[in-house]
Image (cartoon, rainbow, N blue to C red):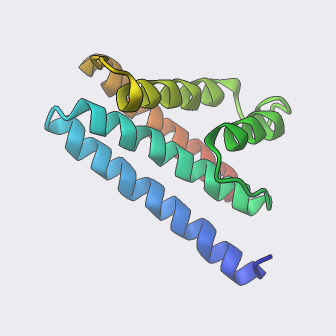
């Protein structure tokens, strides 16, 4: 168990990590490196959910467990709009296909849309963290 000050610092670190990773995604997208861009888009959102989990003292390094907690705690309760669950789930699925599928071609327009949705996701979770 970490003390309150350390927890707050770690939350801030995860938020900054998310924003830095979003900048990496933009760079990769601008240079037509779609697989890497999609990976960074997803991880940017994942780090924001990690920040949220730290605030509410939930710990998991497993993606599916963390996303399940996010949905159960914030989406099903109506505290965060279901749209944001759909965004991160779509990001997770595209990242998984891009990273692990034998052959999978990512569509640049779809990745651009995901990038814009990622930015909305980051803003929404950051707003929620500041409550």
- Seen at 52% across and 31% down, the residue is 92
Judging depth in this view, the residue of 28 and 19 nearest the camera is 28
Q: Nearer the viewer, residue 128 or 99?
A: 99
Residue 17 falls in image quadrant: bottom left
Number of marks in the rendered image: 0
Q: Is residue 131 visible?
A: no
Picture quarter with the C terminus: bottom right
Left or right, 13 with reference to 19 = right
Q: Residue at x 38, y 39 (%)?
A: 39
In-image side of 131 versus 113 (left or right): right
Whether residue 42 is situated above or below residue 23 in the rendered picture: above
Residue 25 lies, in percent from the top left, at 31, 43
The quarter of the displayed image where residue 26 is located:
top left
Q: Residue at x 76, y 32 (%)?
A: 75
Any part of residue 116 in sight: yes
Q: Is residue 57 left or right of residue 39?
A: right
Q: Where does the image place residue 2, in percent across and percent down from the top left?
A: 75, 78
Give above or below for 5 relative to 54.
Answer: below
Q: Position of residue 53 (x, y in %)?
A: 72, 55
Q: Quadrant of the N terminus?
A: bottom right
**Vertical side of 31 occupied by 85: above or below:** above
Q: Residue at x 37, y 48 (%)?
A: 22
Image quadrant assignment for residue 37? top left
User: Who is closer to the viewer here, 79 or 17?
Assistant: 17
């Amino acid at each position: 168990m970490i003390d309150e000050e350390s927890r707050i610092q770690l939350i801030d670190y995860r938020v900054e990590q998310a924003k830095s990773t979003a900048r990496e995604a933009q760079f990769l997208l601008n240079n037509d490196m779609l697989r890497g861009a999609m990976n960074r888009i997803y991880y940017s959102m994942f780090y924001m959910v990690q920040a949220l989990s730290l605030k509410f003292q939930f710990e998991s390094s497993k993606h599916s467990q963390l996303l399940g907690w996010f949905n159960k705690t914030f989406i099903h309760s109506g505290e965060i709009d279901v749209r944001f669950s759909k965004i991160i789930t779509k990001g997770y699925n595209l990242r998984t296909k891009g990273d692990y599928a034998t052959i999978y071609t990512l569509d640049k327009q779809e990745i651009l849309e995901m990038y814009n949705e990622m930015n909305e996701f980051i803003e929404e979770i950051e707003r929620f963290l500041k409550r």
